[in-house]
Every structure is written in structure tokens, then in C-alpha cells.
Image: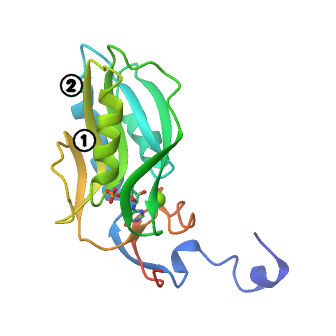
Amino acid sequence: MITPENEAAGGPERLEDGDEVGRVIVSEADLQARIVELGDRITADYAESPPLLVGVLKGAFMFMSDLSRAVALPVDVDFMAVSSYGSATRTSGVVRIVKDLDMDLADRHVLVVEDIVDSGLTLSYLQRYLLARSPASLEVCALLVKEGQQRTELDLRYVGFHIPAEFVVGYGLDVDERLRNLKAIHAYAGSLS
Ligand code: IMP
Ligand code: MG
């Protein structure tokens, strides 16, 4: 918001300049370039059978928006929202479905679009949940995978970037619901509870 006070100081402070926003882990340009590559691969792999993209809210909303436009096929899009019990920054692996899918998965080629895989427990739960709905196939496209954190064996067909095991924000990812609208992935520089 432009107020008389900040206008005098040259405009509102940019989100990127806040104390909590640390160094860039994946730049906006690298994100966009990689999403084009992922979109091309998905377009080739699913040419005969356009997938149903299932985005996991809220973190994947921005990735879903860009990835879906990078796929040159008539895809369908649906979302589910899950919340994992545990602290703000650590999952317990117990997942609650907050919003279920609107679409029937039977005989559909389903591609789950995830923001980040940390322990992998959320995704592992989701895969079991979705497989029970009898899709024709089920694959995962994860934008980010944290190195060395996975506590379960996961089969990830498409991965954007492997990143160091630190807490990150931006491009959909939050800390306590904040900082999702940063254009790049940044390290979180505030204090974690
Ligand atoms: P997992 O079950 O440990 O793999 O955690 C998965 C979920 O935790 C993700 O879908 C995110 O919502 C959240 N998460 C894990 N790491 C981060 C992070 O570094 N920043 C923001 N959210 C994260
Ligand atoms: Mg989250």
C-alpha cells in the first residue's frame, strides 16, 4: 500500500527486503526455465492420455498455475487440501483431508502436483489415499525435494530441484501462512518455533 509516509521514502518496502526473507535458493528465472522443461516432458509422456493434474493446496497453487500452462495438452485440474498434524515446520505424517477432490479418479491418469517433499510422509499418505480411488495411473511432480530428509521410499516421476534441508518460503510456500507470494524460493531467515 502506498501511504504518504512510504511514498516520501520511495514507495512501500518490498517483500523481498523483509528481515525474514533470506538468500535466494531458486531464482524466479530458474523456476520458470525448469517448469518449461517439466511441462515439455509431461506433454511428451502424456501425449496419448492427457492427465488430471491434482494440486495439493495451498503450497502448490503457484506451481500448478505455471506448470499447467507449460503442458500443451488438454489437462483437467483439481485440487485437494491437506493439513498435516505437527508443528508449523515439522510434519507428523498424520494427514487430515481438509478439501477432497471434486473429480472421480477412476480410469484417469493422475499426476499429483506437490510443492515440496520433506520427510515424504504427506505424499506417501496421499499416494495411498489416491490409489484407493482406482486411477489408471498415479505419478508425482514435485517442485522441490529436500536432500536427505525422506523417511519413506518415494517414487517421484518428475522433480524440479533438489535443495538443501533448510526451511524455505516463497512461490507458494509459507511460514505460518505468510510469504507465499515471493517470486523466488528463499531461505527463511526468521526464527522457527
Ligand atoms: P513432509 O510430509 O515432511 O514431506 O512435508 C510436506 C509438507 O510440509 C509440504 O507439502 C509443505 O506444505 C510443508 N513443508 C515442508 N518443508 C517446508 C519448507 O521448507 N517450507 C514450507 N513448507 C514446508
Ligand atoms: Mg505448509
Q: Which quarter of the picture shows residue 48?
A: top left
SS at circle 2: helix
> Colour scheme in the image?
rainbow
Q: Residue at x 30, y 53 (%)?
A: 121
SS at circle 1: helix
Residue pointed to by mark 1: 37
The mark found on residue 44 in the picture is 2
Q: Foreground: 139 or 13?
A: 139
- Residue 53 shown left or right of residue 81 in the figure: left
Q: Residue at x 50, y 81 (%)?
A: 20
The disc labelled 2 sits on which kind of residue?
Ala
**Residue 67 x, y percent position in the rendering:** 38, 39
Circles 1 and 2, Cβ within 8 Å, touching? The answer is no
**Residue 86 x, y percent position in the rendering:** 44, 65
The disc labelled 1 sits on which kind of residue?
Glu
In the displayed structure, 96 sits above or below 184; it is: above
**Residue 114 x, y percent position in the rendering:** 36, 46
Q: Foreground: 188 or 12?
A: 188
- Residue 186 shown left or right of residue 190 in the figure: left
Q: Which quarter of the picture shows residue 148?
A: bottom left
Q: Foreground: 29 or 48?
A: 48
Q: Which residue is the extreme one toward the front?
A: 94
Q: Residue at x 28, y 45 (%)?
A: 124
